[in-house]
Amino acid sequence: MLRAALGAGMATSQLNQLSGSAPQSSGGEPLKVGFVGVGARGSTVLRGLLNLDGVEIRAVCDLREDRVARAQRWAKAAGGPEPAAFTRGETDFKRMCQQSDLDLVITATPWAWHTRVCVAAMEAGKHAATEVPAAITLEECWQLVEASEKSGKHCMMLEQYCYFRQAMQVLNMVRKGLFGEVVHVEGRIQENWIQQNWHIFNSDGTLAWNGEQLSKRNGNPYPTHPMGPMALWTNVNRGDRLDYLVSMSSKSRSINISAAEHFSEDHALAKQEHRQGDANVTLLRTVNGVTMTLYYGGTSPQPWSPEHKLQGTKGTCIGDMFDYRNDRWIESKVYFPEVGTRWADLSDYLREHDHPLWKALGGTAETKRVKNWSGVYDYLMLHQLTGALREGAPPPLDVYDAATWSAISELTEKSVAKKSAAIDVPDFTKGKWKTNKPIDLSRV
């Protein structure tokens, strides 16, 4: 295991470099970006980057030449140079990472390639950023940490849920002390991947890459969306850390049923055993005694719902992180006597407690965003990432966030396999969580 190799021997100079290493680009020079994987999600992130000032796409890597050509056209249409093309197979990203004129490499490939691309980038002296999750296994999580600490290069996971307006407003209110001491949080990811036919089945009757993950694993395979806001609210890795978890999955039914509906009842995918339970519930506890609940459900019919709960000693909020209309928020008799004893809506206090980043850049993000549901959040997230690197500052979310949040997947699998036994969460910071300061994502 890489964990043993990381234990005591990291040089102080390397740790100092990681905390604020300067990128190759500085001053008024653009941040030069290489991009790996420009399919559906990758194309959205790439177009979001092209809407930012001070960013140039210098290289694009994908298995499909038509996707790379499309990305090249977009980059030129945005006024930049034509990016170099890398299309020589699955590992051509390694050749791309050796380009001397790249500051940052971003990957939006299938999950199994995220760690490999990021490690290759950091070993080549480039910063890295990845779509979620950053890693699938604990070993990969430690690989990310080791590569970042050894190279002094940053690795940020692009967790857009942290930038939802409601999530950031709650973060701002937590920082102001309006909820008192946070004692419990809950988050869920549920969306009907199968009915959307999203990465589950290929048209030729085989499992797509995500379907393969769900077929062979059983835990919470996709924890980072709900975990991101929760970790920021509770200062995970910044004054507190995850201690242990227990996890339980329901039986698996929906993949078989959907395969029969898509193909036939006699189809191999309809008959074979698929491991992932239709529902998974995970309980976590931090060293400082905060409890957390994570819910996953991505295979059975249910609406998309990024619902969260935060419970503090002075108040509780419950609501949809995406839609103000579905929120029930703070007990007003505690905080807001002007409205009596009813529960107040979060939107009632948006003007006073809106997050500073949204106040400063929300309008710009709405104007410049890629025109889809995630465009505004992507803009804010990518603005903070690229702006920090251009100025030689650490990105808002670091490699320890990426490793800790992603590690939940394998840890839940271990717990489920052991009849919901308690499983310890590794301390990827190796003690630095005790002195790391909480963040508020306010940097404009």
Image (cartoon, rainbow, N blue to C red):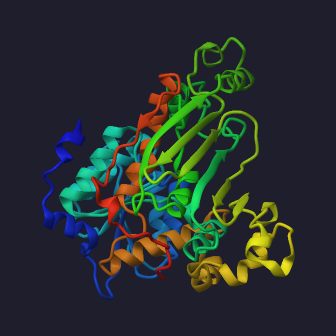
Q: Between residues 54 and 233, which one lies in front from this camera angle? A: 233
> On the rendered image, what quadrant is the N terminus found in?
top left
**Towards the viewer: 259 or 339:** 339
Q: Position of residue 254 (x, y in %)?
A: 69, 26
Vertical side of 138 occupied by 305: above or below: below
Q: Is residue 27 left or right of residue 442?
A: left
> In percent of the image, x 38 and y 44: which residue is there?
113
The percent position of residue 273, horizontal first and vertical second, equals 58, 16
At a point 68% along the width and 22% down the height, the residue shown is: 253
The answer to whether residue 271 is left or right of residue 154 is right
Q: Decide if residue 370 is in sight here.
A: no
Q: Is residue 207 above or below residue 76?
A: above
Residue most extreme to the bottom:
28
Question: Is 272 left, or right, of 332 in this rendering?
Answer: left
Q: Between residues 350 and 278, which one lies in front from this camera angle?
A: 350
- The location of residue 82, given as percent across then percent down, is 39, 70
The quarter holding residue 343 reads bottom right
Instruction: Indicate the position of residue 129 as horizontal and vertical percent values.
Output: 39, 60
